[in-house]
Image (spheres, helix red, strand yellow):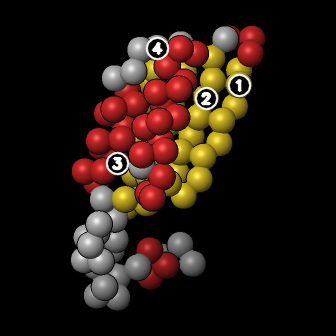
Amino acid sequence: MTDQEETRIAIIGIIVKDKASVETLNDILHHYSDYIIGRMGVPYRSKGLNIISVAVDAPNQVINSLAGKIGKLAGVSAKAVYSSPEKPKNGNHDSDKPGLK
């Protein structure tokens, strides 16, 4: 990644139903570790699945690639939720709008 490349903050939500995919999932996450801010996993034992959230700071194409690779694993689903793009630096901020101070 170059210093000029714009990055976005995103959360990738992952549901793991097939424990056989966990090793491959961890390998993928390790491959993208330079972009990962943090991750949290929660076992949902009564449903027999695991819920994982991964916070990333990366260019759009990297986030899309990571979520896509994870989503292709057997018994795993993944969706990315992105932060809003950076606002123009012309002085327009949400705090300038009535009722948002």
Query: Circles 2 and 1: CB distance less than 8 Å?
Result: yes
Q: Are marks 4 and 1 in contact (CB under 8 Å)?
A: no
Say whether disc 4 or disc 1 marks the residue closer to the N-terminus.
Answer: 1
Above or below, 65 relative to 47: below
Crowd tier of the residue under label 3, counting other residues whose Cα lies within 10 Å: few below 14, some 14–19, many 20 or above: many
Where does the image place residue 101, in percent across and percent down from the top left? 57, 78
What percent of the width, then of the height, locates residue 64?
A: 30, 43
Q: Name the residue under label 4.
A: 75
Give the residue furthest to the bottom.
Answer: 91
Question: For residue 70, what is the image quadrant?
Answer: top left
Mark 3 touching mark 4, by CB under 8 A? Answer: no
Residues under numbered marks 2 and 3 in contact, where contact means CB atoms less than 8 Å apart = no
For the point 67% across and 11% down, which residue is it? Answer: 48
Expressed as whole percent of the image width and height from the top left, the position of residue 18 reads 53, 13
Q: Residue at x 53, y 45 (%)?
A: 54
Instruction: First in sequence, mark 3 or 1: give its number.
Output: 1
| Label 2–label 4 contact, CB within 8 A | no
* Residue 93: mark: none
How dense is the environment of label 1, judged by Cα within 10 Å: few (below 14), some, or many (20 and up)?
few
Q: Which quarter of the figure is the N terminus placed in? A: bottom left
Mark 3: amino acid: Ile
Amino acid on which disc 2 is placed: Ile
Q: Residue 51 carries which label?
A: 2
Is residue 79 something one can see in this rendering?
A: no
Q: Is residue 73 visible?
A: yes
Dot 3 or dot 4, earlier in sequence: 3
- Assign a secondary structure to mark 2: strand
Amino acid beneath label 1: Pro
Mark 3, residue position: 63
Q: How crowded is mark 2: few (under 14 residues within 10 Å), some or many (20 or more)?
A: some
Q: Which of marks 2 and 3 is nearer the N terminus?
A: 2
Amino acid type at image mark 4: Gly
